[in-house]
Image (tube, rainbow, N blue to C red):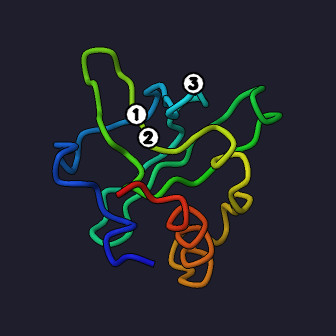
Amino acid sequence: MSDNMWGYQPTVGHTAGNTLTGYKVEASDGSIGKVDKHSDEVGSSYLVVDTGVWIFGKHVLLPASTVTRIDTAEETVYVDRTKAEIKDAPEFDKDKHLGDSAYHEQVGGHYGKHRRV
């Protein structure tokens, strides 16, 4: 897993402290839901996305490195993964997503194997 999996790409231009909660989330092939929660913590930045009815009301954890662009005018976050890649990710665990390195490795490993270069 890349050391940068849990950090925003420099080209995204996200500034810590700017809320993304409520922003729409667009995968490379369509909408996947809205940001329910996010973290700007260095080395552990992520988005929790509420997928609504798309995958039966589940939440997914997206490492910050999957974000390619944030459009503040449209309140939309764009990620470089397909809907299928996101749907096939390990199930979001609200009790483990904070501070559980094994869970972060599992999630990061899933997204890392689909990483765009």
Q: Is residue 108 above or below residue 68?
A: below
Helix, strand, or loop for circle 2?
Answer: strand
Which residue lies under the disc numbered 3?
Answer: 31
Quarter of image, res 94: bottom right
- The crowd level at tag 3 (other Cα within 10 Å; few <14, some 14-19, many 20+) is some
Residue ID for mark 1: 78
**Residue nearer the viewer, 104 or 69:** 69
Q: What is the total number of numbered labels drawn onto the structure image?
A: 3
Q: Secondary structure at mark 1?
A: strand
Real-space CA distance between mark 3 and mark 2, rounded to the nearest whole angstrom = 10 Å
In contact (CB < 8 Å): disc 1 and disc 3:
no
The residue located at (49%, 29%) in the rendering is 26
- Residue type, mark 2 in image: Val
Q: Return the x and y of residue 52 as percentages of the image width and height.
A: 71, 28
Q: Quadrant of the C terminus?
A: bottom left
- Residue 5's spot in the image, x, y percent? 39, 67
Q: CB atoms at circles 1 and 2 under 8 Å apart?
A: yes
Q: Name which residue type carries label 1.
A: Tyr
Q: Which residue is mark 2?
A: 79
Judge the density around disc 1: few (<14), some (14-19), many (≥20) Cα neighbours within 10 Å.
some
Task: Pick out the residue farthest to the top.
Answer: 74
**In the shown orientation, is residue 67 left or right of residue 11?**
right
